[in-house]
Image (tube, rainbow, N blue to C red):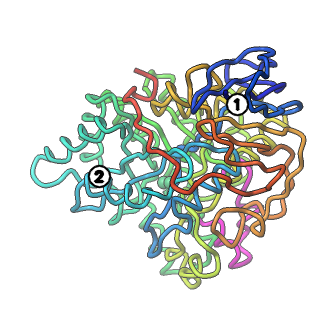
Amino acid sequence: MGTLISGGSVVNADGSRFADVLIEGEKIVQVKNKIPAEQHTVIDARDLLVMPGGIDVHTHLDMPFGGTVSADDYTTGTQAAVVGGTTTLIDFALQTQGRTLREALQTWKKKSDGKACIDFSLHMAVTDLGAGDGSHGLREMEEMVAEGITSFKLFMAYPGVLMIDDALMFRVMQKAAELNALCCIHAENGSAIDIVVAQMIAEGKTAPHYHASSRSPKAEAEATHRAIALADMAGAAVYIVHLSNAYALDDLKHMQKRGARALAETCIQYLVLSIEDQMPGKSWDEAKYVFTPPLRERWHQEPLWRALADGSLSVVSTDHCPFRFADQKALGRDNFTKIPNGGPGVENRMQIMWHFGVNSGRLTKERFVELCCTAPARIFGMEKTKGSIKEGLDADILLWDPKVKYTISATTQRMATDYSMFEGWTVEGNAAKVLSRGELVVDNVAQPGQFLGTTGRGRFVRREANAGGLA
Ligand code: URP
Ligand code: ZN
Ligand code: ZN
């Protein structure tokens, strides 16, 4: 006896059709028109779309940053994700300089053990290969890949904390190439930005919007080009995280045309928020939108949408890095450099992408699935278990109501922040029900916003090393 999702329209990245979906245990066992109900528990999916659960490959849960710790831990963060239709996360383990990758992994396993409510994996941020020739760190990279951590994050920003120089970046890229692993890059020229920041502070420019002016689109474009060029020289596949503007996009496309194995994501905030609308330089409230890269002028949004449609950009993530406004963003009340960088979004990604992508005609529903579910699984080595509605895959299933209206608000969200970046916005389209490995864990119709599963049920996902699917 299984669970039968009956009467819905199944949407995969490669096409849509009316079909029933039969689940046995944790797996999808049949996708076919008119499967007999027999003894199965039936979920009525008439008027709903049956899609793979979302995969958000860029989150920061329980992460020490900017003098504080991100507000969502593995319990609140994964619950917020799944209430919004996302069934898998890839979070970041950060190596502290002077410490090992193993220690970073142990620290993040402790944060997630017994707390994650949906499946998750980890990228490993490398900040240090150890003394001498770095052979210890390079050996640890091999161990990470053997344990299913097949992507390494490299920061070109945040000098003195996470930033590494080109030499270290190149060495890690060479090793990643050997291991078939993927290099994920935060691409901003941190050294140039730090000079501009110091000059602004010296001039008394301390309000939140100066954070955005200090980190120009050109600083991101320069680093994007450099990262891809170095990866190309090293023979590595590279994935640019949170690409935010049209200049960086031009550099990405240029290098893709030249044959570099380069992929990139953008995030929901860069597609629908802007300096003009959220950060005009008028109030302290704008600290809610201090994240890195910063918001850009509105004209950058359409080129990003076009790149999502034409395939130059491959994924939409959130860079969910939540801080409360009242007591965490407040750390930078008198100085924007002290405002913890990051914003909350993991709960809203599917809603925002559906409303502003599909409803507006910018994306087909199949492209929505590709960007939010299927490409993340393929690029990050999980396509054998996640990212599509196919026989044999995990039954991570999103029943999507494309017609329901939903108003986003901090008062009703699951994320642990005291604000929403999209406060009061009404979107059309929301998760009706969500299954994670065959278990109904969200029913937004009967019990809106509630997580119905057991805390700690989420499992660590070991991923394959496949060079971003570009091997
Ligand atoms: O502002 C952000 N994005 N905070 C999280 C760290 C990062 O750079 O992704
Ligand atoms: Zn970043
Ligand atoms: Zn991030």
The crowd level at tag 2 (other Cα within 10 Å; few <14, some 14-19, many 20+) is some
User: In which quadrant will I find the C terminus?
Assistant: top left
Residue 271 is a magenta residue: yes
Q: Is residue 229 left or right of residue 445?
A: left
Residues shaded magenta:
269-291
The crowd level at tag 1 (other Cα within 10 Å; few <14, some 14-19, many 20+) is many
Q: Give the secondary structure at mark 1.
A: strand
Residue 59 is a magenta residue: no
Front residue of 113/149: it is: 113
Q: Percent position (x, y) of residue 103?
A: 26, 57
Residue 326 vs 112, above or below: the answer is below
Q: Which of marks 1 and 2 is nearer the N terminus?
A: 1
Q: Percent position (x, y) of residue 318?
A: 60, 50
User: In which quadrant will I find the N terminus?
Assistant: top right
Q: Name the residue beneath numbered marker 2.
A: 165
Q: Identify residue type, mark 1.
A: Thr
